Image (cartoon, rainbow, N blue to C red):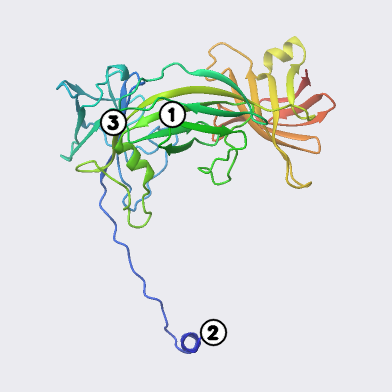
Amino acid sequence: MSSKLLLFVMGCGLLTACEIDKVGIPRSNARVALHGMLSATAQSQMLLLERTRSGTAPSYDLSDPVMNTSLAVSLAQVELTTPSGQTFFAVEDRGQGAGIYRIALAGDALERGGAYLLSVRTVEGEVLTAQTSVPLGTADTIGEQRVFDRSRDTVTITWPVVAGGARSYMVRIETPFGPRVFFTDSSSIRLTGGLRNVDVTSLTRVFIPGFPQAVTVSAVDSNFYDWFRTENNPLSGTGLVNRVEGGIGVFGSLVRLHFEEFSVVTPQSEPASGTFLFEGTLLERRGTPNLSIELYVESRAARADQADALSGRYERRPFLGMEGCATCGLLGNVRNGRIELAMLRAWSARDTADVFTGEIRGDTIVGFYRFGGGPVRFVKQ
């Protein structure tokens, strides 16, 4: 320890008031935030208007797609002018959530190369303007199907080079833990089964056995690229490349050039993996929530005192008025024959419909649902 630092520490111990200076960060004013994107494959164009938090923390409403109705900007006048001079007026889609506006303009009708002008006027009199040019390139509307064995397959995806209007190419891979998104200037990518999702803190694998995972490549304009490649500083609020006049946000455009869906699998050699069918009487079958489960060992435990991670899908029993997916995803774990499965509401790890807990007895899984009761038996095929 240097002599100056030692004297400082001793001085703080002897004096009754030795404080570090505190600096207060002033609260910023709330601004209108615009999130809009023209898509060449969308049936209609949508945008979101809300206000920045500006140091406040309003209540959080999961039932609203906007996530917080107190931030939504409603009753705004939104106009979109095409490169040929035609004007479209947006309608607030209150059925989807406050602050969401829809423009009745199909993606295949978008004009390429020219400037689209967006004008927003709020009921408070605030005015936002922005513009974008839709990249060239033929939109891919029909997705290819591919079985992807994560244990051995490597896939190279190529797409045509866009002659004008594209700043970069965005690659997006859907996963149950959130999408893996990155930009590239190349016209091809190479995907391996061992790819990790650096957009998720726990670095989960990108490809999860049992899940359908869409892979898309889109040509994006400069507005889209600059907004999503920059980062908002949590203290100063600066750092983002903002081209919205009168507010903050992004109004960009994209053209999906490549689209396919991977059906991800891996060998099912462990006792906890395979296809298991519900076993029971006709009466039990009429009351059970699920008819089958398909399990994969997603990753083996690193230590003996840890559980292996499981993934897969389950088939719901159909019934009158049934909503949602007929086949949905599941995630879970198994250790020493004890198994726990989170039955997802669709294919997202963020939304669990029920939890199944049981044990493996030879070729049979016996257990209970947290909400659906039991006992329930599934026999391996």
Tell me which numbered mark, 3 or 1, is placed earlier along the sequence: 3
On screen, residue 353 versus residue 73, left or right, reads right
User: Residues under labels 2 and 1: Cα distance?
Assistant: 56 Å
Secondary structure found at label 1 = strand
Residue type (three-letter) at the residue carrying disc 2:
Met
Residue type (three-letter) at the residue carrying disc 3:
Gly
**Marks 3,1: beta carbons within 8 A:** no
In this view of the protein, which residue sits in the foreground, 78 or 271?
271
Residue picked out by circle 2? 1
**Marks 2,1: beta carbons within 8 A:** no
In the picture, which quadrant includes the C terminus?
top right
Question: Which percent across, then down, holds residue 261?
Answer: 53, 22
**Residue shown at 60%/38% (left/top)?**
205
Secondary structure found at label 2 = loop
**Residue shown at 78%/20% (left/top)?**
379
| Among the 4 quarters of the image, the one containing residue 267 | top right
User: Residues under labels 2 and 3: Cα distance?
Assistant: 59 Å
Residue picked out by circle 3? 165
Question: Which percent across, then down, holds residue 159?
Answer: 43, 25
Other-residue count near label 3 (Cα within 10 Å), few / some / many at <14 / 14–19 / ≥20:
many
User: Residues under labels 3 and 1: Cα distance?
Assistant: 15 Å
Residue picked out by circle 1? 217
Q: Nearer the viewer, mark 2 or mark 1?
A: 1
Tell me which numbered mark, 2 or 3, is placed earlier along the sequence: 2
In the picture, which quadrant includes the N terminus?
bottom right
336, above or below 294, in the image = below
**Residue shown at 31%/17% (left/top)?**
108
Question: Which percent across, then down, holds residue 348?
Answer: 54, 31
In this view of the protein, which residue sits in the foreground, 267 or 72?
267
**Residue shown at 36%/71% (left/top)?**
22
